[in-house]
């Protein structure tokens, strides 16, 4: 009898869904003296003796166990960036009752793996991440991978300084421009005066002075050595491939402060995932990666050696890696892009002045029309340009498009009762699903890959600027729809148009530098690979990204972290967060514990999911999420010194019964 009971209990246990126990990973965090830059020994924080730490691999459906031992002389932590985790294992001290890992202690993380994709892990204590405490994290899917590739390589980019992170913060507090080694000088003024006239030049300098800002303050911290998998250019980092294979590059920006531009001249990259989530393929020549973002791209390079070239946004650091089938072959870096000068218009203070370029944001709002562009289609009265520009709605397609679908006549499409099918010609692009089979519903044709649209113009038009306007999709103009003619200060001094160059050869505009005709990724190019239910939000939270550069304080709605109450959200609530960037810096905003959908102009159901979204200077960006993970979650700028100086909030998701997470402090 007892044997029979044991048998049925065993069978019941086998039938119940349980997480598979994964291998246990042991990570040791300690100080080390290492040569990151050849010929120079620096003090770093290493994980298992290396910078970056080891690449961790999990599988969807497992329970991952990671034991972290702290051999530092101060508390530490590990945050699993982008992972869906139970609150106490998120790894952010001061949230969900987690106090950090004390010196000499070992803390065991237990993570139920509920996703797949490319992620990373890093310290969330003081400035330890900057000192080297980070690594890549790859999660294989439980079933077939929707992203098909023959091989994969992980490339973790990071910015390295020999200075202690604490000293970097003290330098910024003493002088926010401490690391701006590109300030405009008297010779620069004279060259600008020669090109634009002394009156206009002095007026522009005066306007910047009145705002107590610097037009060349592109990045708060410079002087970095940019690394690829822990190696600078001098160490000759290598990424190997086999000719004829589809190679998946898992790109991770693990920098503390550096936005980066990535390109492989002569090799097309196909973007297939953003922050671990699959997206519809987008063909690009280059992409800008915000701090803490991850991107998966597919490449199929020809045999030989190709330059994998990465520059920081301020052009003061770079790394050259060899994407090669033969490590003995040399690679040469392409010509660097010009340094930038910010425009006053990028502060959200002005409309395009007479003669100034028509940016993609202003064109989207109907304020102007780019040179050579075709007249816009008739507007959708239910989705005016200013609302579409902020991503709050998607204009209906012109009725003529509906005529191609007999099941969705124009009058029904106009009322939003149906969506016309794509013209049959689109199906011809998929040889595995010919039009006649698609028409019978026997298959669904694969759509031709999208193409990066950040650069709208294929060639320089007559009278055009040396460089095109580049719209990375990092937000929209927050003043869309306002009557700018009645607002003071809307026409501030303008030396040149966006994409023009100043007297010293620097290009005007935060986003400029890519050439005409380049296929550059815009956030608005992204669409989810698989449609999902994305109901409209029932609540909106507005967060103003603000800062005091003189004191080097960064805030959300004017408050540093801890100065105001947490953001309270009900479990299951659909929430829109609108970020309004009132500063001259771009901010990569990161939400722990949950993914959000980016309102990028895609229809509901296809908005891409991410966990980091960059908001450009003077721009507004909205995200939407379902609060389905109970806990206390950090919401912060992922620029390390911005977060550490105040740009963070606590977002609390109450449980379904209304109770707050254990350890919650109001």
Image: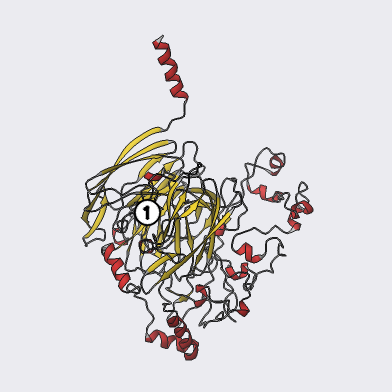
| Horizontal and vertical percent position of residue 381 | 72, 63
Q: Nearer the viewer, residue 631 or 184?
A: 631
Q: Quadrant of residue 214?
A: bottom left
Q: Quadrant of residue 480?
A: bottom right
Q: Residue at x 39, y 51 (%)?
A: 665
Work out whether residue 325 can be spotted: no
Q: Is residue 104 left or right of residue 195?
A: left
- The foreground one among 590 and 135 is 590
Tell me: residue 44, above or below residue 549.
above
* Image x and y of residue 319, in percent: 36, 62
| Whole-percent x, y for residue 26 in the image | 28, 41
* Count of residue discs: 1
Look at the image and name its color scheme.
Answer: secondary structure
Quadrant where the N terminus is found in the figure: top left
Q: Is residue 6 visible?
A: yes
Nearer to the camera, 581 or 544:
544
Q: Position of residue 173 (x, y in %)?
A: 32, 70
Which residue does the numbered mark 1 point to in the structure image?
156
Q: Is residue 273 left or right of residue 228?
A: right
What crowding class fits label 1: few (fewer than 14 Cα within 10 Å), some (14-19), or many (20 or more)? many
Q: Residue at x 67, y 50 (%)?
A: 426
* Secondary-structure class at tag 1: strand
């Amino acid at each position: 009898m007892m044997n029979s009971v044991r048998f049925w209990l065993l069978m019941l246990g086998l039938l119940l869904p349980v997480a598979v126990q994964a291998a246990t990973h042991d990570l040791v965090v300690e100080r080390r003296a290492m040569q990151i830059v050849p010929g120079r020994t620096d003090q770093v924080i290493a994980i298992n003796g290396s910078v970056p730490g080891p690449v961790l691999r999990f599988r969807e459906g497992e329970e991952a166990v990671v034991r972290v031992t702290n051999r530092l002389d101060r508390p530490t932590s590990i945050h699993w960036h982008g992972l869906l985790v139970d609150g106490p294992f998120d790894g952010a001290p001061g949230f969900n009752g987690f106090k950090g890992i004390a010196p000499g202690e070992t803390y065991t993380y237990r993570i139920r793996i509920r996703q797949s994709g490319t992620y990373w892990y890093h310290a969330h204590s003081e400035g330890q991440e900057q000192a080297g405490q980070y690594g890549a994290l790859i999660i294989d899917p439980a079933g077939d991978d929707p992203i098909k590739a023959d091989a994969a390589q992980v490339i973790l980019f990071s910015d390295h300084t020999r200075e202690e992170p604490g000293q970097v913060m003290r330098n910024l507090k003493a002088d926010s421009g401490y690391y701006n080694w590109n300030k405009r000088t008297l010779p620069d003024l004279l060259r600008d005066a020669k090109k634009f006239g002394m009156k206009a030049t002095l007026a522009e300098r005066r306007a910047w002075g009145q705002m107590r800002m610097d037009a060349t303050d592109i990045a708060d911290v410079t002087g970095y050595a940019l690394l690829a998998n822990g190696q600078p250019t001098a160490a000759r980092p290598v990424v190997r491939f086999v000719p004829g294979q589809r190679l998946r590059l898992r790109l991770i920006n693990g920098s503390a402060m550096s936005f980066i531009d990535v390109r492989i001249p002569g090799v097309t990259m196909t973007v297939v995932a953003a922050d671990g989530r699959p997206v519809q393929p987008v063909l690009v020549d280059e992409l800008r990666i915000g701090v803490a973002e991850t991107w998966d791209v597919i490449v199929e390079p020809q045999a030989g050696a190709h330059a994998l070239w990465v520059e920081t946004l301020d052009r003061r650091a770079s790394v050259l890696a060899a994407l090669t089938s033969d490590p003995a072959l040399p690679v040469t870096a392409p010509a660097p892009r010009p340094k930038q000068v910010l425009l006053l218009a990028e502060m959200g203070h002005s409309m395009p002045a007479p003669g100034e370029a028509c940016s993609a944001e202003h064109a989207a709002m109907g304020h102007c029309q780019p040179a050579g562009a075709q007249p816009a289609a008739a507007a959708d009265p239910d989705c005016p340009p200013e609302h579409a520009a902020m991503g709050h709605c998607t204009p209906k397609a012109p009725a003529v498009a509906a005529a191609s679908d007999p099941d969705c006549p124009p009058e029904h499409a106009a009322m939003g009762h149906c969506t016309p099918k794509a013209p049959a010609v689109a199906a011809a692009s998929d040889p595995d699903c010919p039009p006649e089979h698609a028409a019978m519903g026997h298959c669904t044709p694969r759509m031709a890959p999208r193409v990066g649209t950040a650069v709208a113009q294929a060639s320089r038009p007559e009278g055009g600027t040396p460089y095109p306007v580049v719209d990375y999709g990092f937000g929209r103009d927050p003043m869309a729809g306002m009557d700018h003619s009645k607002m003071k200060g809307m026409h501030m001094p303008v030396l040149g148009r966006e994409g023009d160059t100043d007297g010293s050869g620097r290009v005007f505009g935060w986003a400029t530098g890519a050439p005409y005709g380049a296929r550059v990724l815009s956030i608005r190019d992204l669409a989810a690979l698989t449609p999902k239910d994305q109901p409209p939000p029932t609540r909106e939270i507005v967060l103003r990204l603000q800062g005091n550069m003189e004191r080097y304080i960064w805030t959300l709605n004017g408050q540093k972290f801890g100065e105001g109450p947490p953001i309270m959200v009900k479990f299951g609530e659909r929430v829109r967060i609108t970020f309004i960037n009132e500063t001259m810096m771009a901010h990569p905003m990161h939400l722990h514990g949950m993914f959000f959908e980016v309102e990028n102009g895609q229809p509901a159901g296809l908005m891409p999911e991410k966990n980091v979204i960059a908001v450009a200077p003077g721009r507004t960006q909205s995200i939407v999420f379902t609060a389905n993970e109970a806990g206390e979650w950090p919401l912060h700028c992922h620029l390390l010194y911005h977060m550490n100086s105040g740009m963070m909030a606590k977002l609390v998701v109450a449980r379904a019964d209304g109770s707050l997470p254990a350890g919650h402090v109001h």
